[in-house]
Image (tube, coloured by chain):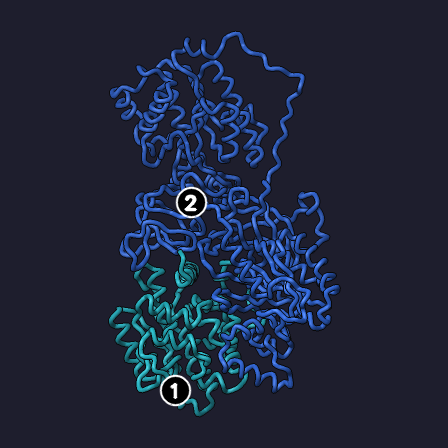
Amino acid sequence: MSMESTGNLELHKVVVVGHVDHGKSTLLGRILLECGRVPDDRIAHVEKICSDKSLQFEPAFLFDALQEEQEQGISIDTTRVNFEFDGHKFILIDAPGHLEFLKNMTSGASEANLGILVVDGNQGVRSQTERHLKILSMLGIRRVIVALNKIDQIKYDQTKFEEVCKRTREIIEEQEITCEQIVPISALAGENITTSTPKLDWYVGKPLLGTLIDTAQKLNNLKKDEQPFRMVLQDVYRFEGDRLFAGRVVSGSISVGAEIFFSPSGKISRVEAIEKYLESGVDSASAGESIALRLSEQVFVERGEVISLLDNAPEIDTEFRGKLAWLSANSYSADAEYTLKMGTAEVPCKVELLDPATQQKRTTDSEILANGGFADVIIKTAKPVAFDRAATGAIIEKFVICTTYDTAAAGVVDNRPVRVERSLKVNPNLRHESGYVERLRYESLNGHRGAVLWMTGLSGSGKSSLAKELEKTLFAKNCRVAVLDGDNLRFGLCADLGFSPEDRSENIRRIAHTAKLFLDTGFIVITACISPYAKDREVAREIIGAQDFNELFVFCPLEECQRRDPKGLYSKASAGQISAVTGFDSPYQAPQRPAVRLDSSKMTVAEEVEAVIALLSQNEVLPAEHALTTELSEILRTSSGPRSLQAIND
Amino acid sequence: MSDYLDSLENESIFIIREAYSRTKNLGLLWSMGKDSTVLLHLVRKAFLGNVPIPLVHIDTSYKIPEMITWRDNYTREHGLRLIVGANKKALEEGMNPGMGRLTCCGALKTQALLDTIKDHKIQALLVGIRRDEEGSRGKERVCSPRPESGIWTYKEQPAEIWHYYNMHVPESIHLRIHPLLQWTEMDVWEYIRRENLDIMPLYFAQDGKRYRSLGCSPCTGTIDSTASNLDEIIEELRTTKTGERAGRAQDKVDTYAMQKLRSGGYM
């Protein structure tokens, strides 16, 4: 999760990275000294330490304050300080260079939005130079300035400088990072940091801090696209009886009155008020703000949900591709159960390593993923989790992988889909043969138009009950009607399919084609299958044709479905006897703009039928005289009884 | 959101809410000083005006007397739950700064804190330390796990990536959570002014002296100052060349005094 404000904050967080002993802390200390914000007693303190050790004044000690750091001349852990130069505010983050402290380096760098890469003019690019760049790239830092340090030691030699520049530029570009400028400096002597020096008369750019300000301004001027609204839910408070949904806006903005969607639970509500202590009448909130929402329709949700607008929700799935940096002294294990933290969600997961060349699962464990290693992975979670992929505007995309008590790896969701598309090849010699009777003539014979009512919803949400009731009602109206029940089709047409995402896709494809055949002879087709993936329903819409495809979202909260549990699936899943149960350990991607949303926890079947008949009349599938009479709707209402009874008989 | 103080406030509220949601028996370590009073205000903001956690004050018995009076009035006025912790045994045995300032801090602050955490089964404490106070605090994490002995293993701190704080710890571990870590002394004063917070009067100059940092009376000195209101304090800070803790004697006992105190579990 990236939570840097996307507002017009002028303050930039700059991490200073590079190989061991290339002079990161010295540079930082020097910057602080030159900008004159170090208290006299702190300078005196460092002067005393240096004179006790018979050392020349060491600016690095302003940052490396620990005894062990000063004695060994290294940085162990990251720190950060605020500094101001020429009216611009920055936070400078020091990052240790040793491989063994990589987790500390990453801890510091994860907060940054800009990097200064320090490269020793004598030594050039070294192992941690490259590793740090890889980390920055993974963390999403897209711009660096290079401080080519110790220019005094290479005698201000331009040729030597150019040589180091060449290789430095190459490795930066490899990581798809923009190298803003390479600035020759001496951190120890304080040259070309705030002011230029005549010793570098061949250097045409600005000194380091001038370059930093230019780059920061460039970042400020970048026009940011309006990002979709995302808020991570931290907690639900019940102070004085009110339920308040507390969390942080990660991107976009939200206003009072907006219809909101919770992922992965699929619940929907509306913002009644945005609460902030001591502020009244807050009517909107944007990225970075910590707020609490009061909702007009109560929903039961817990910490871990991502709140979005109804028509722009994150993805929900139980597997995704990612890129990882391993940061733990304990190596990766294929058998280990890890915890994925994404947003405020925490979910048990497994991590599968992929071969970087083939992107297939690695077959051998010959290559150990250990501290400082990078890997392409597939994360498989025990419960559905919400996230964004870069293609849809990456927001909820940064995650960590934890062991019981420790953070083992940092990662980012990879843009590529995790599943291989089934290839459907139609023989080019085939041609489509039209029937003798056209659909229109069937329809005029039937006295109504054909249509597909595509139900989607969790197991136990009431799809089959509604399908039966609709069948009854339409039949009573002399309509040609066919019900395609997902479970029934799995006895025959789809008997070879299981519940993997791939098989579920194929299941939907076959049902859609079957529905299409009925549709072509003027039927009103009712399909009742979970169809959990938005992508699969899109495929069905394409096969059937958008004008005939009516998506009916049969909504029911998971807890209610589990209580009803007509097929005993949820209790079996809870007992660990079966897996891949939608909503439980397999994702359900709720439709965001269905033709009708039927809340079966609140509506009776009769009311649902009425709503669907109204839809069919409105779409002119049924002629006007077929519209439901008050008497018929009254009969339906009394005959079907409340939903809960219906579900028990299901 | 355009203001830097807003972004600090939002960040701190996020951390406080994480702590409240992810830990059991959260407390707020309150010294009545400017930082922990800002922290208390942020707790109110996080919980929409409520303070659902107890305040913990470690009383060394050497505090400047006005501090204790102010503490009791403030908690009464705001109806706050206050836990006062003290190392009674050491006090009975006559512990005082004359026995060594660091020894005294270790007994009356560190040990008293650890005993209070244990006695009240506190799993996590919000602590108002800031990176810019002194070098060893600069190396802190937002969320710092401590064993029962309180020791800070600064050479082996856990990774803290993005906003994923490690708040899941075994029962024997308690957490020090630092929502103000990234604030500076100046930020704190500007925020106090903006939010118009009720703050201990000792910070304001009287007769040419004021406290810049508050602690125990034998070890905390005043500075020369005429800053008698918030505007003047902020103006003074803009130009001063002296560090915030220059008046704190325990920092100067030896070169790494604070690191030594803090690695032993000091706040």
Q: Nearer the viewer, mark 2 or mark 1?
A: 2
Query: For the point 71% across and 49% down, which residue is it?
Result: A364
Q: Secondary structure at mark 2?
A: strand
Could you tell me which chain the residue with mark 1 belongs to? B
Colour chain B is painted in: cyan
Q: Nearer the viewer, residue A434 or B21?
A: A434
Q: Position of residue A458 (x, y in %)?
A: 44, 36
Disc 1 marks which amino acid? Leu
Decide if residue B16 is in sight here: no
Q: Quadrant of residue A104?
A: bottom right
Structural crowding at the residue carrying mark 1, measured as other residues with C-alpha within 10 Å and reported as few (<14), some (14–19) or many (≥20): some
Q: Which mark is residue B91?
A: 1
Q: Secondary structure at mark 1?
A: helix
Q: Which residue is situated farthest in the top direction here?
A: A436
Q: Is residue A400 above or below residue A97?
A: above
Q: Which mark is residue A308?
A: 2
Q: Is residue B248 above or below residue A322?
A: below
Q: Nearer the viewer, residue A630 or A258?
A: A258
Q: Which chain is blue?
A: A
Q: Position of residue B158 (x, y in %)?
A: 55, 65
Q: Nearer the viewer, residue B183 or A364?
A: B183
Query: For the point 36% across and 32% down, which residue is it?
Result: A598
* Quadrant, the C terminus of chain A: top left
Could you tell me which chain the residue with mark 2 belongs to? A
Q: Position of residue B153 (x, y in %)?
A: 55, 72
